[in-house]
Image: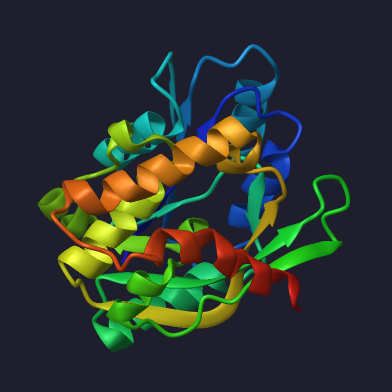
């Protein structure tokens, strides 16, 4: 099976080399790299051309990171699609090999795993650990979601159920996983391994305003899918992060 890995970039020169090297070190050979760039003015495109010259690259203005991801999905030719942010990197050389094996053995539509948050400068320093745990559909009602950078999906699922909804702000990844896993109940498998290391400082947590927009987007994610959460579901979602500091 061929795996397409999409990376959205915008002035990502400071961290992108780590991202690319983590893909190049993968033991699995059938990987397509797609970079959707928002019109970088730094050395981002030069780094891509030097470190990953055979990749697919599009550089143009877009409507934000989820628009870029949708563009990448539309270009992907792989059987499986994963998304790796430009400041994240794979935790080990066997990540793609192991997840492809799980797709095949479980006949899964999607695979996810665990994620480590690391210091933005010293990436050897662990700050939080997101152990996703085995999937149960009802867990969404208790504020659960898998780490999106670890979420790999068969291309035909995107074709059948659509890509990212740009109208739910920074909750677009949550809405997509809620739609796939909870509304349509696709078959998913859990890879019990740290798949991705993420530098701290995500978009939804950069300010109180962004956090409020994320909470509004979470609520909209349920509404637009015609789903009803428990009264405490959206309160439980951010509270679950507390357990990530207990490593």
Instruction: Give residue 100's quadrant in the image.
Output: bottom left
Image position of 120 with respect to 150: above or below? above
Q: Is residue 198 left or right of residue 230?
A: right
Q: Name which residue lies at 54% across and 59% down.
A: 238
Q: Name which residue lies at 31% across and 51% down.
A: 175
Residue 207: image location, x then y, percent: 65, 34
- On the rendered image, what quadrant is the C terminus found in? bottom right
The residue lying toward the viewer, choosing from 224 and 232, is 232
Specify the color scheme: rainbow
The residue lying toward the viewer, choosing from 226 and 174, is 226
Q: Is residue 68 visible?
A: yes
Tally of marks: 0
The residue lying toward the viewer, choosing from 145 and 122, is 145
From this viewpoint, which residue is outermost toward the front? 231
Residue 19: image location, x then y, percent: 65, 47
Image position of 27 with respect to 117: above or below? below
Q: Is residue 33 visible?
A: no
Instruction: Give residue 9's quadrant in the image.
Output: top right
Q: Is residue 202 left or right of residue 6?
A: right
Image position of 39 with respect to 92: above or below? above
- On the rendered image, what quadrant is the N terminus found in? bottom left
Instruction: Give residue 109's quadrant in the image.
Output: bottom left
Residue 89: image location, x then y, percent: 65, 54
Q: Name which residue lies at 58% across and 37% down.
A: 203
Residue 41: image location, x then y, percent: 64, 11
Q: Is residue 113 left or right of residue 163?
A: right
Q: Name which residue lies at 85% across and 61% down.
A: 124
């Amino acid at each position: 099976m061929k795996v397409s890995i999409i990376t959205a970039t915008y002035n990502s020169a400071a961290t992108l080399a780590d991202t690319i090297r983590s893909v190049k070190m993968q033991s699995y050979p059938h990987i397509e790299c797609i970079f959707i760039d928002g019109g970088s003015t730094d050395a981002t495109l030069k780094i891509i051309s030097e470190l990953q010259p055979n990749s697919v690259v599009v550089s143009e203005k877009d409507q934000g990171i989820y628009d870029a991801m949708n563009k990448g999905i539309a270009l992907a030719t792989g059987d499986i699609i994963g998304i790796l942010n430009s400041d994240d990197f794979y935790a080990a050389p066997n990540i793609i090999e192991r997840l492809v094996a799980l797709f095949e053995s479980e006949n899964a539509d999607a695979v996810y795993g665990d994620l480590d948050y690391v210091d933005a400068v010293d990436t050897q320093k662990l700050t939080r650990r997101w152990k996703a745990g085995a999937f149960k559909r009802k867990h969404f009602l208790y504020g659960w979601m898998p780490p999106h950078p670890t979420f790999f999906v068969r291309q035909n699922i995107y074709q059948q159920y659509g890509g990212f909804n740009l109208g739910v702000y920074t909750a677009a990844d949550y809405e997509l996983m809620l739609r796939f896993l909870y509304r349509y109940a696709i078959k998913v498998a859990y890879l019990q391994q740290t798949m991705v290391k993420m530098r701290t400082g995500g978009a939804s947590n950069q300010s109180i305003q962004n956090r409020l927009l994320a909470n509004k987007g979470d609520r909209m994610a349920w509404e637009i899918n015609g789903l009803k959460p428990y009264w405490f579901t959206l309160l439980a979602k951010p509270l679950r992060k507390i357990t990530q500091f207990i490593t």
